[in-house]
Image (cartoon, helix red, strand yellow):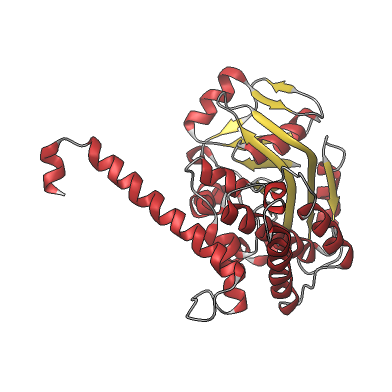
Amino acid sequence: MRVLVVGAGAVGGYFGGRLMQAGRDVTFLVRPGRAAQLAAGGLIIQSAYGDVTLREPATILAQELRAPFDVVVLSCKAYDLAAAIDAFAPAVGPETMILPLLNGMRHLDLLDARFGPARVLGGLCAIGATLNAERAVVHLNDTHSLAFGERDGGLSDRVQRLAGVLVGAGFDARPSARILHDMWEKWVFLTTLAGITCLMRAPVGDILAAPGGDELIRSLLGECAAIAEAEGFAPRAAFLAQTRAALTAPGSTLNASMMRDIEGNAPIEADHIAGDLLRRRGDADQGPGKLSLLGIAYTHMKAYEARRVRTLAAAANAKQPSAARDRI
């Protein structure tokens, strides 16, 4: 089975790299700069589960795509989704399975509109990973799992064939007969974690050490879980127990990648994660007396985005010659 991994960043680089290490037929769809890096130094993974340098991984540029792949693994950030769709579209044939690993649900609508629901599986991954200054994939925790399945349930023949590729490839992989429920639960967890750590600009343990921190975390989790329940995907008891334990562990350094992105002045997925969940409750447009904790967290994220756009524009303007600035 020919697998196209869209991107070789932290998530795509890790799971695609492990697949390649296990002997699977993997090609990375990358931009020219990343292709040059991988050609020169290989794909480097640093992990408690084993460091590896994969020399000369197969890469391809968007303009070079000519034939369909059996599987397209999509691991980009939500704000890069439109560009990614245009890039990998030539790799999608009548039998191609698209496996998105994005968080939330909004991306499914965009993929369905472009390729049709029949080609788009449900999927999610759980991993803490980043690219360091040398562009190596650094695995930050002890979790590296991936779930996938048909969105209407059941274990189809094609999902079982895909399991033959993904299972046993150096990470935890499992086909799921309830993948949409799994995705909703992850969305509840992630929105709670991102919302509270971005709002407080601190990891879980530090929030818990502050007055009212425990109550805020539990309140936000309850709010997110209530939205999922209203949508027909009530979080299961075991998930809620595990999530509460993770989010209320004293001294925990757990935080969201979105918080780290804010601290690094990077783009974030505010609309895709918090905004879309809020929209499904019906009050994305907050009015007087309607503010919720999720709404406050979302407003905080959007204020960061507005400030980032403004400061980047000001910095770009300051670099222009004075005559050019006068013409703007």
Q: Is residue 299 above or below residue 139?
A: below
Position in image of residue 312 (x %, y %): 35, 44
Q: Residue at x 77, y 72 (%)?
A: 233
User: Can see residue 205?
Assistant: yes
What is the x, y in percent for residue 215? 72, 64
Front one among 211 and 208: 211
Q: Nearer the viewer, residue 169 or 276?
A: 276
Residue 76 can be seen in this image: no
Q: Dividing the image into 4 quarters, which one contains the N terminus?
A: top right
Quarter of the image for residue 154 reads bottom right
Q: Compared with residue 40, is residue 68 higher up or lower down, i.e. above or below? A: below
Residue 242: % across, % down: 85, 57
Residue nearest the observer in this picture, 40 or 275: 275
Residue at x 54% of width, y 41% of height: 65
Residue situated in front as seen by the camera: 4 or 293: 293
Picture coordinates of residue 169, whole percent (x, y): 83, 36
Q: Is residue 56 above or below residue 246?
A: above
Residue at figure coordinates x 84%, y 43% from the top left: 172
Furthest toward the front, the residue is 211
Residue 107 to residue 24: above or below? below
Label tally: 0
